Amino acid sequence: MGIFDVNDLTNKIDVGSQPGTMWSLSSQKPGHGLGELRDPNFDKLWQSDGLLPHLINIQFARRTALTHVSLYTDFKEDDSYTPHKVRILAGTHFHDLVEVRTRELLEPTGWKHFILDNFEDGNESDDGENDGSSDASDSSQSSTSSILQHRRKSGTHAELNTSKRPLDYLPCGVSKRHAPIHAFLVQICILSNHAAGKDTHIRGIRIFGPPTKASREKAKRDLRKLREANSEKGETTADIHAQHEQKRRKKTLDGMRRWALAEEVAVSHNPDASQNAEREDDEEFRIHTSRRLNLLSSIR
């Protein structure tokens, strides 16, 4: 799936942490707000304080390519506070938001991914979010056909990039048919909770996209500074590139460690996960997790 592989962090960046990005919540309990939601410690959480639906708004400083949104939930700890039906909307501002993806989650524990791809064929089946929710009761549906219908009626071009550009315009691993959406604003909407719960708990959130021009330029500047800093030491260009690659690899592995840690936390909260119907069908996800853990152990 290229950049839509949620287990591969080497070809995407956390666009939610870019300078100029603004986060806001529809409501919050004291001590359980935006800081706790963005904290890497999953013992901290966002708790809403109001009527459904509960909203998380992410506004970007510029039009941004997006591949997927990831939410961390823990049904064992949160029970009726756990989100059940979640909808992702995108657009240029609050008045032209359209639906991109909707999922119904059954007692979710761990990361749940919402792929924000751009299918031009509304009849195309969804590739599915590979997060351990492959059972029939955890539905994942693509809403691109409704987006395209809305676009034809209203003439809005904010939510998707469906222009016929050359293939080399798109990031590596992306085809014209399977491309990320582009938006200034993303809204995560909690429509319902388990057991008709009123307020919701979310313990982590990240939003990803392909590398931007700014991030590539920053990488070039870093390489140029590294080359200048080492020019007096007599090091070869190969040595400088090796150092730069080592730095990039370390950043990537740090991200992989965070994902692996999240899975360890999820397993510790649910020791009987191997006998949970939601995890039994997740053989592919376990293989990916095992490979990441093996890689981490080999470099420690």
Image (cartoon, helix red, strand yellow):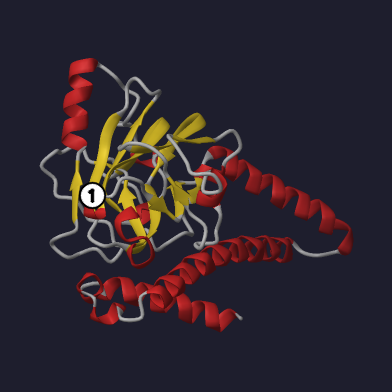
Q: Nearer the viewer, residue 270 or 213?
A: 270
Report the amino acid beneath label 1: Ala
Estimate the x, y position of residue 88 in percent, counting from the top left: 31, 40
Q: Nearer the viewer, residue 256 or 201?
A: 201
State the quadrant of the C terminus.
bottom right
Q: Residue at x 26, y 73 (%)?
A: 279
Compared with 170, 268 (above or below) is below
**Left or right position of 261 against 85:** right
Q: Residue at x 20, y 44 (%)?
A: 142
The furthest residue to the top: 154
Viewer can see residue 5: no
Estimate the x, y position of residue 99 in percent, counting from the top left: 26, 34
The furthest residue to the right: 232
* Residue identifier under label 1: 196
**Left or right position of 265 against 252:** left
Classed neighbour count for the residue bearing mark 1: other residues with Cα under 10 Å, few (<14), some (14–19), many (≥20): few
Give the quarter of the image for residue 191. Answer: top left
| Total marks in image | 1
**Left or right position of 228 against 220:** right
Q: Residue at x 52, y 58 (%)?
A: 44
Estimate the x, y position of residue 273 in percent, counting from the top left: 30, 77
Give the quarter of the image for residue 26. Answer: top left
**Left or right position of 199 against 47:** left
Q: Nearer the viewer, residue 263 or 175?
A: 263
Viewer can see residue 124: yes
State the quadrant of the N terminus.
bottom left
Estimate the x, y position of residue 217 in percent, counting from the top left: 62, 41
- SS at mark 1 in the image: helix
